Image (spheres, helix red, strand yellow):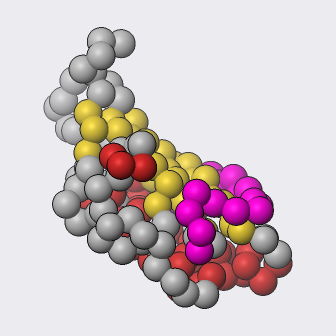
Amino acid sequence: MPRDARTITNPPTLHDPTPFGYSHAVSAPGDVVFIAGQYASDATGAPVPGDFAAQVDLAFDRLRLALEAEGLGYEHVVRLGTFVVDHDATKLGVLGKALHTRFGDRLPAQTLSGVASLALPGMLFEVDAVAVRPEVPGGS
């Protein structure tokens, strides 16, 4: 793949991730879009305090913004990676509710990883995604 074959998107609706060493979304040649881990963050990328449920909702809002910057929505997501600090069954219920609220009965594949901590103090949840662009009728 040529060096310039990928497209990097850091939408103004999300914090600038480059000081942290990543981009919010990268499109590969073809139809696949990779969305970096999104979390409950403010405009500077600092974690927003809150309980687990509030952080899950805000992280999924950030995921939606990253998808929209690529012209996509939740319906285009085929895989999620979720990361939960100090995972337990209660948190699984919260996450399940958030997923069904956003994806209905068409849930993407998902891997949930219970972790001791995440990148920044105060982060309780993070979600990354792989999405696929829809075929364009008559396109090649």
Q: Is residue 72 above or below residue 104?
A: above
As rendered, which of 34 and 117 lies closer to the eye? Answer: 117
**Residue located at (75% from left, 60% from top):** 115
* Horizontal side of residue 139 vs 5, given as left or right: left
Q: Is residue 36 above or below residue 51?
A: above
**Residue located at (42% from left, 43% from top):** 21
Q: Is residue 79 above or below residue 51?
A: above
**Residue located at (36% from left, 74% from top):** 42
Image quadrant where residue 63 sits: bottom left
Confirm whether residue 60 shows in the render: no
As rendered, which of 68 and 3 lies closer to the eye? Answer: 3
Q: Is residue 88 above or below residue 113?
A: below
* Horizontal side of residue 16 vs 21, given as left or right: left
In the picture as drawn, the residue positioned furthest to the right comes out as 89
State the image coordinates of residue 125 (x, y, percent, origin top left): 60, 69
Image quadrant where residue 91 sits: bottom right
Image quadrant where residue 16 sits: bottom left
As rendered, which of 130 and 114 lies closer to the eye? Answer: 114
State the image coordinates of residue 24 (x, y, percent, origin top left): 36, 50
User: What's the magenta region?
Assistant: 106-122
State the image coordinates of residue 67 (x, y, percent, origin top left): 33, 56
Taking the magenta stretch, the answer to whether it contains residue 100 is no
**Residue located at (33% from left, 46% from top):** 18
State the image coordinates of residue 85 (x, y, percent, origin top left): 71, 68
Confirm whether residue 16 shows in the render: yes
